[in-house]
Image: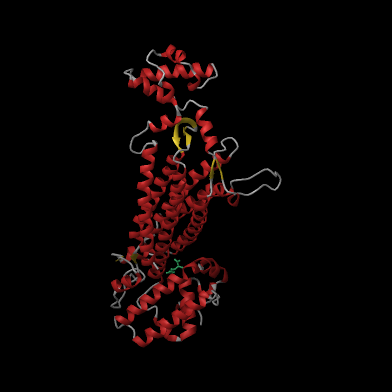
Amino acid sequence: MSKLWGGRFTKKTDQLVEEYTASIMFDKEMAVEDIQGSLAHVTMLGKCGILPLDDVEQIKDGLHRVRNKIDRGEIEFTISDEDIHMNIEKTLIDDIGPVGGKLHTGRSRNDQVATDMHLYLRKRVVEFVGMLQKLQEALVEQAKANLDTIVPGYTHLQRAQPILFAHHMMAYVSMFQRDVERLQDSYKRINVLPLGAGALAGTTFAIDRHFVAQQLGFDRVYENSLDAVSDRDFIIEFLSNASMIMMHLSRLSEELILWSSTEFAFVELDDAFCTGSSIMPQKKNPDVPELVRGKTGRVYGNLMGLLTVLKSLPLAYNKDMQEDKEGMFDTVRTLQGALQLFAPMIATMKVNRDRMRQAVSQDFSNATDIADYLASKGIPFRQAHEIIGKLVLYSIQNQKYLLDLSVEEFQQFSKLFDENIYSVLQPENVVNARNVYGGTATNQVSDAIARASGVVEETARWVDEYLAKSK
Ligand code: ARG
């Protein structure tokens, strides 16, 4: 058989045109979803009396056979059938004969492709929530194991104030929680059925869109047929959410890379997640975080690409929209690759607490605390800041840290200093003094861990429920 749309044509398609316009090379990724949508569609055609039930049964049997053949890798997709929709339809017709041609009744490839993408993406989004949840679990575990590990906290990449390493880990748990919530929220805009919109205007057949939606587990149907076939917002939203996740992963990557350097030596990534150098035998390179940082670029690129494709497109379907897929698949693969490595890489990361501790005792990150000390004794904070600034300068000039100064030296700067200043300056006390909701004090961080553990467990339940819903 020639083209499924060949009737109006008198000439063969140019070979280069065929190659240029085909999408089967990449949209075959949605074969399962295409058959899933077709099964629901044809069931509805039977239920509404549009097709005889006998035809419906033959088509459904045929679709199941096509599905099995695809699973076994027995189908050779061809670019002369352009895309996954026509490859499957053609295979079906080859298998069951002309009755297979009834499947496309009341449907267009425009509402079909949109449906496939909604089915495809809603599964991926739930899986990504699950992967983020696993990463959060690994971060929470590191936090629990490091509730007494003190590390310099930085601003401007300069040592600022000591914090718990657990607190640092929990900052990422919060970041990834926003990503989880964004993906969960996007689900309600993905889980909408376009099918039944036809090519653009609806269909002359008395179909039941809500029945199809219900069979496929969609919560709603698109309100407007033009919008149904031309909406790609849900993909852009996914690409945007993926960009944000990659940006977060990239920030964490950057920290892991810095911390793994000899200069910091705060952590050591497990050998399984690093690679060596072909020339320098001593090297152990943090390739995984480096590549995640690098691959963030292509994910942003895919977002920009699709935003630009959609810009200025008139309603409704335009062939330009076929460009929505490769970037989406690429982003899905890139994000899968990063997330599936990140959770075990964090879980197996060795934390060098002695080295962190040493860093904290050889700096001035406790300076704020003595400014606060004077301020709490009635000196205006601005003035206290000035006094401590001079004290730090004095210490630097005398090659001492604050804890090395004698009481007499402190008192040269303010008579309000007494012996208890040494206790105030201890890193543990500096950390625990920040006993404010969301702060780094040990009891605050352990409360934060408890709260986050509850939230992360809740997400695990959401994933189980929605995975079942999104099959
Ligand atoms: N392969 C096409 C795409 O991905 C399917 C829809 C084609 N519709 C059409 N009217 N040519 O966009």
Residue at the extreme bottom of the image, as rendered: 54
Report the residue at 37% width, 32% height from top.
434
- Which quadrant: the C terminus? bottom left
Which corner quadrant of the image does residue 193 belong to? Answer: bottom left
Question: What x and y, as percent, mark residue 335?
Answer: 49, 55
Question: What x and y, as percent, mark residue 381?
Answer: 35, 21
Count of residue discs: 0
Which corner quadrant of the image does residue 172 belong to? Answer: top left
Question: What x and y, as percent, mark residue 48?
Answer: 29, 80
Question: Looking at the image, can residue 435 be seen?
Answer: yes
Report the residue at 70% width, 44% height from top.
281
* Residue 97 horizontal side relative to residue 19, left or right: left
Depicted 2 relative to depicted 133: above or below: below
* Residue 423 horizontal side relative to residue 197, left or right: right
* Residue 297 horizontal side relative to residue 313, left or right: right
Q: From the viewer's side, name the closer residue of 291 and 441.
A: 441
